[in-house]
C-alpha cells in the first residue's frame, strides 16, 4: 500500500526527518488533568495520570484543535503492548515532553481494540509515508483528523539508530505547521484521497478471475518461505496462520494432489514453519499459548505479549494441520493452548479477555523467564546444566536467563513432568501481569471457530461443548436490547460501540463452522446456528454495503466521529480482513441453503480479489482460502444418528476440508453426500475431489 495513483510527492514529507533543530524554547513544569480517568478502556486509563493533556477520540478534541488552530497527535496502542508502555514511560510521563505536546498540539489517545476503524485507517496512512506500521502508532493530523505524517515508536533521546527523538520531532512539526500549514493541508488531502481510492481494490471484471490465480499464489507464497528457519519473512517473524491455512486448503485440490512436486513443497513449507513455531520460543511451553512474534530469524526470542486473536487463529491452524499430518506435536500445541485459554483468559460462559501484557514487574517477559538458581531448585543441577549447555546462544534473553523450549519428543512424559513443575512454580510467583479484560466480539468469534476446529481434530465433545457455550454467551452478552451487535464488552458492562465488519463476518463464520458439527452433541441445533449466521450476514450487508461497487465498508454509516475517509479493507493484518471473511460466509450460506443470492454476493466479492490475487497474494491468505475451498467443493453429509459418531471420528483423520454433518431423523438413514460449488471446479470433477472421504 506504499504506492499511489495520486500525487504522492509530498506524502514522503522528508523535511520532517532532516535538520531537526535543538529545542531552545523555555518551558515550565505543570500538570494538567486529562480526560482519560473515567474511560472504560484499560489502555486509556493507563495514561490517565500522565502530564499530557490527553483527550479520548471524539468531537470535543477536534473542535478544540480547530478552535485553537493546533495540529493533532493521535497516539494509538493497546494495554499489553511493550513498546507502547516504553514510549509512555520515556516521553508521556516526562513533564518536559508533555509540556511541548500540550502547548503545541491537541493530544488524543486511542485504544485500537475499541476503535479498530481508526487504527486500521491510520495504519494504512502511515504506510503511505514509507514508515513502518505498528504500535504505538503516532499520527500527526489536521484539526479534522486528516493525517499528514506519522510513525510508530520514537525514543525520547537520540539512540543512534536513525530515529528522530520525539521532542525534536514535535518541535519540527509544530514549526512547520506555523510556517507552512498549506503544505500540510495539501499533504493530508493527498493522503485521504489515496485512502478512499484504495477502496476500489483494483477491481476486475468477472471474466478476469481464473482459478490459476490460486496456483500462482501457492507458488509465490512458497517461494518466499524461509527454508532454513520457517516462516515467510525475515525477522521480526510473525505467525502466518492465514497463509498456512491457504496452503493446507490448496493441498486438497486435485491439481496439487496430481503434482507431487508442488504437493511436497506445500507440505515442506507448512510443516517447517509450524514445527519451528511450536518448538521454539514463540510458544509458551510451560503454560501454553503463543506470544506475539519473534524478534529473530530462528523463532527463539519472542515479544512476550499474548493476544487472544493470535491464539485463536493459531489454534485453528494447528487443529487443521493435525488432521492432515497427525503429528503428536500439533495435538500437544492444540491441547496446551486450550488449557492456557481456560486458565488465564476466561471461559466459554464468560467470554475471553483480549490480551496479557508483555511486561510484568516492570520487565518485558519477566514472568516467563528463569534464572539458573531458580531452575536448580526446581529441577536439580544436572537437568539445569544440560538445559544451559544446550541453549542456543541466539536464544538468550539475558546471559543468565532461560525461556523453556521443547527439548525432546512431544510425547516424552519426563519432559511433560518437568514443564508441569515449572508451571506450578511459576504460578506461585508474586509477579503481577496485566490482563485486559475487555471481550472483543470479533476475537471471541475467531475463538468460537477455533474451538470447532479443535473439536473435529481431537474428536472432542468437550471442545465442541465449549464452542456451543461460547456461542450462547456471545448471543446473550454481545447484542444490545434491539438485537444489534456490539463490538466489545467490558468485564462488568456492555459497550455502546456499534459493530464493525469484522464483528459481523467473524461471528457469522464461527456460527457456520459450529453448524457443521453441532448435531454431534446437540441434535437439531445446526439450523438455529445457520439462521443466526444468515441474520448477521444480512445485517452486515445492510449496515456496511456500498451499493456502488463490491466489498463492504469497515465502519457503519452513522458511526459517531468516524475516522477520516470511509474505508474498505482488503488485506489481512494480524487478523483476516472482514471482506475476506465475508467470502467464506457467502459461499457457505450458498452451499447450505442453495439460495442464488448468496452465490451472487460471493462472486461480487471474489471478483474484487482477482487483481489482488495476482499482485499481492501474500496479503490475502484468508480470501484465497475461502475461494480455494469453494472452488474445490464444499461437502455436506446427512446421515442417521447411528452413523454420526463414526462419521465424526472419520473426519478427524481426514485432510483439512470443510464438511457439514447433519443428522437425519431416521436413525438408520445411510449417509447422503451433497457437493455444491459456484462454478465448475477448475481442478477436476467434484466426484474426484471426494476420494479422501471414500470411507464415508
Image (cartoon, grey):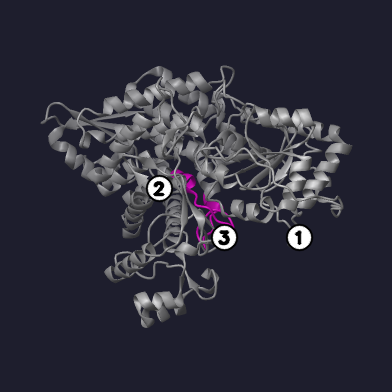
| Viewer-closest of 235 and 210 | 235
Question: Can the viewer see residue 1?
Answer: no
Asked whether 500 or 538 is in front, the reply is 500
Q: Position of residue 423 (x, y in %)?
A: 35, 64
Of residues 626 and 259, the one drawn nearer to the viewer in this rendering: 626
- Disc 1 + disc 3, Cβ < 8 Å: no
In percent of the image, x 57 and y 42: which residue is there? 44
Looking at this rendering, what residue extends furthest in the left direction?
A: 668
Residue 314, position as x, y percentages in the image: 42, 49
The N terminus - image quarter: top right
Query: Given this view, does label 1 or label 3 mark the residue nearer the observer?
Result: 1
- Marks 2, 1: nearer the viewer: 1
- What label does residue 334 carry, if any? none
What mark, if any, has residue 158 been given in the picture? 1
Horizontal placement of 23 versus 377: left or right? right
Q: Secondary structure at mark 3?
A: loop
- The residue stretch that appears in magenta: 222-246
- Of the numbered discs 2 and 3, the one sitting upstream in the chain is 3
> What is the distance, in whole Å, between disc 1 and disc 3 at their CAs?
22 Å
| Majority secondary structure in the magenta region | loop
Check disc 2 and report the residue beneath it.
317
Earlier along the polypeptide chain: callout 2 or callout 1? 1
- Against 556, is 8 above or below? below
Q: Earlier in the sequence, mark 1 or mark 3?
A: 1
Which dot marks residue 295? Answer: 3
Amino acid at each position: 500500500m506504499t504506492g499511489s495513483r495520486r500525487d504522492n510527492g509530498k506524502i514522503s514529507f522528508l523535511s520532517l526527518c532532516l535538520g531537526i533543530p535543538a529545542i531552545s524554547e523555555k518551558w515550565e513544569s505543570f500538570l494538567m488533568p486529562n480526560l482519560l480517568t473515567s474511560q472504560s478502556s484499560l489502555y486509556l486509563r493507563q495514561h490517565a495520570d500522565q502530564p499530557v493533556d490527553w483527550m479520548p477520540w471524539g468531537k470535543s478534541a477536534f473542535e478544540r484543535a480547530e478552535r485553537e488552530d493546533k495540529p493533532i497527535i493521535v497516539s494509538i496502542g493497546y494495554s499489553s503492548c511493550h513498546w507502547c508502555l516504553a514510549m509512555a514511560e520515556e516521553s508521556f510521563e516526562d513533564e518536559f515532553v508533555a509540556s511541548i505536546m500540550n502547548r503545541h498540539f491537541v493530544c488524543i489517545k486511542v485504544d485500537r481494540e475499541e476503535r479498530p476503524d481508526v487504527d486500521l485507517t491510520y495504519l494504512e496512512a502511515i504506510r503511505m509515508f514509507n514508515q513502518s506500521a505498528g504500535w504505538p502508532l503516532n499520527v500527526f493530523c489536521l484539526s479534522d483528523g486528516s493525517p499528514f505524517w506519522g510513525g510508530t515508536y520514537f525514543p525520547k533521546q537520540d539512540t543512534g539508530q536513525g530515529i528522530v527523538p520525539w521532542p525534536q520531532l514535535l518541535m519540527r512539526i509544530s514549526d512547520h505547521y506555523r510556517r507552512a500549514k498549506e503544505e500540510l493541508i495539501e499533504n493530508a488531502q493527498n493522503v485521504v484521497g489515496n485512502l478512499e481510492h484504495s477502496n476500489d481494490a483494483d477491481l476486475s471484471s468477472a471474466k478476469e478471475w481464473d482459478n490459476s490465480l490460486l496456483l500462482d499464489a501457492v507458488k509465490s507464497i512458497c517461494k518466499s518461505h524461509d527454508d532454513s528457519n520457517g516462516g515467510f519473512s525475515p525477522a521480526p517473524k510473525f505467525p502466518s496462520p492465514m497463509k498456512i491455512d491457504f496452503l493446507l486448503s490448496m493441498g486438497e485440490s486435485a491439481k496439487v494432489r496430481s503434482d507431487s512436486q508442488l504437493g511436497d513443497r506445500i507440505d515442506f513449507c507448512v510443516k517447517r514453519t509450524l514445527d519451528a513455531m511450536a518448538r521454539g520460543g514463540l510458544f509458551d511451553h510451560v503454560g501454553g499459548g503463543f506470544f506475539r512474534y519473534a524478534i529473530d530469524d530462528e523463532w527463539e526470542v519472542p515479544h512476550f505479549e499474548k493476544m487472544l486473536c493470535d491464539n485463536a487463529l493459531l489454534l485453528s491452524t494447528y487443529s487443521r494441520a493435525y488432521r492432515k499430518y497427525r503429528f503428536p506435536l500439533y495435538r500437544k500445541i492444540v491441547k496446551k493452548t486450550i488449557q492456557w485459554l481456560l486458565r488465564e483468559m476466561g471461559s466459554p460462559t464468560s467470554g475471553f479477555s483480549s490480551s496479557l501484557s508483555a511486561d510484568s514487574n516492570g520487565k518485558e517477559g519477566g514472568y516467563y523467564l528463569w534464572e539458573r538458581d531458580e531452575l536448580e531448585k526446581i529441577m536439580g543441577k544436572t537437568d539445569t546444566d544440560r538445559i544451559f549447555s544446550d541453549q542456543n546462544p541466539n536464544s538468550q534473553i539475558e546471559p543468565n536467563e532461560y525461556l523453556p523450549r521443547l527439548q525432546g519428543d512431544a510425547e516424552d512424559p519426563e519432559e511433560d513432568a518437568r514443564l508441569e513443575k515449572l508451571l506450578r512454580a511459576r504460578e506461585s510467583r508474586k509477579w503481577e501481569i496485566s490482563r485486559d479484560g475487555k471481550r472483543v466480539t470479533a476475537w471471541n468469534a475467531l475463538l468460537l471457530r477455533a474451538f470447532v476446529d479443535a473439536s473435529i481434530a481431537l474428536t472432542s465433545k468437550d471442545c465442541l461443548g465449549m464452542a456451543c457455550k461460547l456461542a450462547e454467551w456471545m448471543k446473550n452478552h454481545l447484542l444490545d436490547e434491539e438485537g444489534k451487535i456490539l463490538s466489545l464488552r467490558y468485564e462488568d458492562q456492555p459497550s455502546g460501540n456499534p459493530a464493525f465488519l469484522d464483528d459481523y463476518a467473524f461471528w457469522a463464520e464461527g456460527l457456520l463452522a459450529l453448524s457443521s458439527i453441532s448435531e454431534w452433541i446437540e441434535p437439531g441445533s445446526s439450523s438455529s446456528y445457520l439462521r443466526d449466521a444468515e441474520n448477521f450476514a444480512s445485517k452486515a450487508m445492510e449496515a456496511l454495503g456500498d451499493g456502488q461497487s463490491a466489498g463492504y465498508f469497515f465502519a457503519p454509516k452513522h458511526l459517531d466521529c468516524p475516522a477520516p475517509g470511509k474505508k474498505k479493507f482488503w488485506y489481512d493484518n494480524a487478523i483476516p480482513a472482514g471482506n475476506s471473511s465475508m467470502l467464506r460466509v457467502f459461499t457457505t450460506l450458498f452451499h447450505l441453503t442453495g439460495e442464488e443470492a448468496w452465490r451472487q454476493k460471493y462472486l461480487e466479492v471474489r471478483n474484487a480479489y482477482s487483481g489482488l490475487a495476482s499482485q499481492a497474494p501474500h496479503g490475502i491468505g484468508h480470501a484465497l482460502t475461502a475461494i480455494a475451498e469453494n472452488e474445490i467443493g464444499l461437502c455436506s453429509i446427512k446421515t442417521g444418528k447411528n452413523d454420526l459418531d463414526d462419521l465424526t471420528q472419520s473426519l478427524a483423520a481426514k485432510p483439512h476440508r470443510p464438511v457439514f454433518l447433519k443428522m437425519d431423523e431416521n436413525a438408520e438413514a445411510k449417509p447422503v453426500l451433497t457437493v455444491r460449488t459456484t462454478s465448475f471446479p477448475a481442478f477436476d470433477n467434484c466426484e474426484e475431489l471426494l476420494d479422501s472421504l471414500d470411507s464415508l
